[in-house]
Image (cartoon, rainbow, N blue to C red):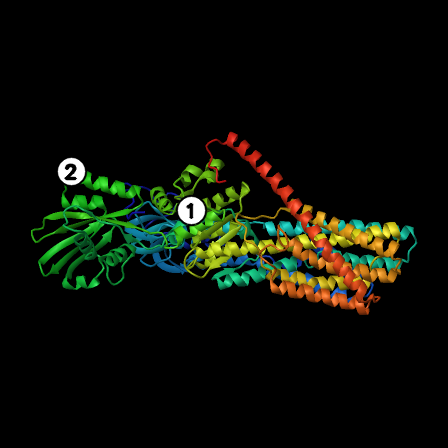
Amino acid sequence: MNRSASPAPQAGANIAAEPETDLQCGLSEAEAGRRLAEHGPNAIVEKHTSPLVKFLSFFWGPIPWMIEAAAVLSGIVQRWEDFVIIVIMLLINAVVGFSEEFKADNAIAALKQNLALKAHVLRDAAWRDIAASNLVPGDVVLIRLGNIIPADVRLAEGDYLSVDQSALTGESLPVDKGIGDTAYSSSIAKTGEMIAVVTATGANTYFGRTAKLVESAQTTSHFQRAVLKIGDFLILITLGLVALILMVALFRHDPLVQTVLFALILTVAAIPVALPAVLSVTMAVGAVKLAHMKAIVSRLVSIEEMAGMDILCSDKTGTLTKNELTLGEPVLLAAKDASEVILAAALTAHTDSPDAIDAAILKGLGDAAMLKDYKVVKFTPFDPVRKRADAEISGKDGTFQVSKGAPQAILELTGADDALAQTVNAHTGKLAATGYRTLGVARAGSDGKWSYLGLIALFDPPRDDSLATIHQAKDMGLDVRMVTGDHVAIAREIAGKLDLGTNILAADEAFDREGRRHDGDRIEAADGFAQVFPEHKFKIVKELQSRGHIVGMTGDGVNDAPALKQADVGIAVSGATDAARAAADLVLTGTGLSVITRAIEEARMIFERMNSYSVFRITETIRVLLFMTLCILVFNFYPVTAVMIVLLAILNDFPIMMIAYDNAPVARRPVRWDMHRVLTLSIVLGMVGVIETFLLFWFVDRYLGLPRDVIQTIIFLKLLVAGHLTLYVARNEGWFWDRPWPNWKLIATTETTQVIGTLAAVYGWSVTPIGWEYALAIWAYALAWIPLENAAKVFVYRLMRNGRGARSRHVERISARLHPHARNDG
């Protein structure tokens, strides 16, 4: 936004008609007290919930109920080892969830730190300092250089006020305001001094509404929903089959205590007690890797969301751009060369404490030593009434004057003719259309005659790595959308430079004055958004989420906090405010955006690991539970003992924890939880395992005629060896020998536990010994089935891919008919 004065209302306009007040005396203390009781304090009110209540809430839900029931049953039958392990798992899950619940509270607290603490207010015709929290609508306040504006105010008296509201609106330059304009709470007065009337306080201010948006932002991660679905599925299978076993046992008059104990152990082994913990550990290991990339994860589930993110809404200023003005090529009018224009502009700059514009001009000058040849005799700083800054200079060529300011103001100063005015207007319009801000520069000799030297073009350039990062993101199937508070022309120019597309939608085209959306299709199809406020960013994210997208949002200011909190993945860039960092899921500590694409790659590998574990865990539950249920129902035989079930559970825990370190492929497109795919594959692999185990049972029972206790050990070893080998099958979509190969930690741990189980079966550690002959035969049998399992998996994946492709083409045809002009991103 260019520096410009706001149009002042006519004299006598009733600025303070609402709320009612007297500009000469202010409010009385009695009236202020009444309004304070009516409107409440000028503060952001937080909703507090007892920490104990929050903590206890994590013990309520389908999975916690089942785990708690298993813990109670363990205590009843005095299996204290199981009881302790189950309780520890419950506490770990509760602590992890409880810590994440403080995210919203931290974001609100960071927002509150931006509020002014004191205010200079007129009460009972006397000026005094009071706590800003005691301000009420109608109070008359004085705003000076450096003040944090304590509430939303309407400017009533004074010449001008230059306000830095970048943290609220994203505008990269201070905004000049005059009588009748509104200044927002928590913005900062940079220059000028004015008297103002408070129009809104607390949650009713622009800033307060931003804080309320942060508080209201609520998302349930796809990871959390997936865990619940997996847990519910396993719980239903377990309860159904265990209930069937109990009914049959009661019908057969089996010993009640033995049956209940077996059912208890089977339930504890089958219920996904460690499911949340294992997946959390997998993400935590990934979070450590991301930290080495200078990306701090503040919410673990956001890693999974990042893997599926298909739209990244990126703030422009300070994120895609450097947030530092740079000189373009000057437009020459009366000047002989560009250096003459830049030198004249530099002579009107504050060299000791330059603002963004002066800093860019001084940097464009190149050699600051050139200024030593000149002495500033008189300096008149920029103000929005005159719209220019003037200086009288003494140099080696004598005394002269220079001026820089708004192009129209310099035209007026130089008394330009119509031809020059048309030339200046043409260049200014052309530069504005391409996103440049312009300043006019003039010089007058000792005769006092001004000449228009030329125009200086200023722009905020893209970061050096932004273009490459965006191209890489697109190659990964990520659609990047620019979101900025700047003008459409500026946004369109930057978007063009970064290959983002130039279909930029202004906020007032997408939303009406009440913030309701006009056209969701236009919002979804836009390449970016301009002239947006915090509530617009927030609603853009929500609209895209409502259309099935997993949305990321980058930002650095208070104005980005609501959208960062609402987004599936909120990313606070380097140098972000505390409010933005507290609301975000990922905080970048290094400059640039390239770390985002690296983080997405890591997130997609983490997702593959979690997917592998889910498939393995469901497969094993189906394989063990269904086989045991069929054996009990058909043959009235318990194929493994309770001790063997405990051993299987313990030996399974070690390799599945190593999944967190496994090598995993990086998907070329965003990945999401597909429960249909996970459950279908798990059921197929589980049924293959049941058939495999039944054939072995039939052979050793009917053909070899082995004793039942020996058969139990054989089945135990087969379930252990084949189950662990299934890890290698489940870890990718191709053949088990395809790259990337398993990590050495996974291989070492898996094979170690298999060897331990084999030694237990061979030498009879808590089981009937079977010797090396049968043990090696079981290994050969399990290895022989691996290619068959893998072939079944590849076949299932191929069927699902073909079905998904056909559905996708059908949906695209329907969408093309319904929205013939909508953009197709493939």
As drawn, the label of residue 419 is 2
Decide: few, some or many residues near mark 1? Use Cα within 10 Å; few <14, some 14-19, many ≥20.
many
- Along the line of sight, which residue is nearer the eye, 780 or 647? 780
- Quadrant housing residue 99: bottom right
Circle 1: residue type: Val
- Quadrant housing residue 142: bottom left
In space, the residues marked 2 and 1 are separated at their CA atoms by 39 Å
- Along the line of sight, which residue is nearer the eye, 277 or 207? 277
Asked whether the residues under the numbered discs 2 and 1 touch, taking CB atoms below 8 Å apart as contact, a structural biologist would say: no
Q: Residue furthest top?
A: 817
Element marked by disc 2: helix
Q: Position of residue 725 (x, y in %)?
A: 69, 58
For residue 471, side relative to residue 163 (left or right): right
For residue 558, side relative to residue 260 (left or right): left
For residue 731, side relative to residue 72 (left or right): left
Q: Position of residue 565 (x, y in %)?
A: 51, 52
Q: Position of residue 435 (x, y in %)?
A: 31, 45
| Vertical side of 661 occupied by 209: above or below | above
As drawn, the label of residue 483 is 1
- Along the line of sight, which residue is nearer the eye, 710 or 91? 710
Question: Mark 2 or mark 1, which has the lower sequence index?
Answer: 2
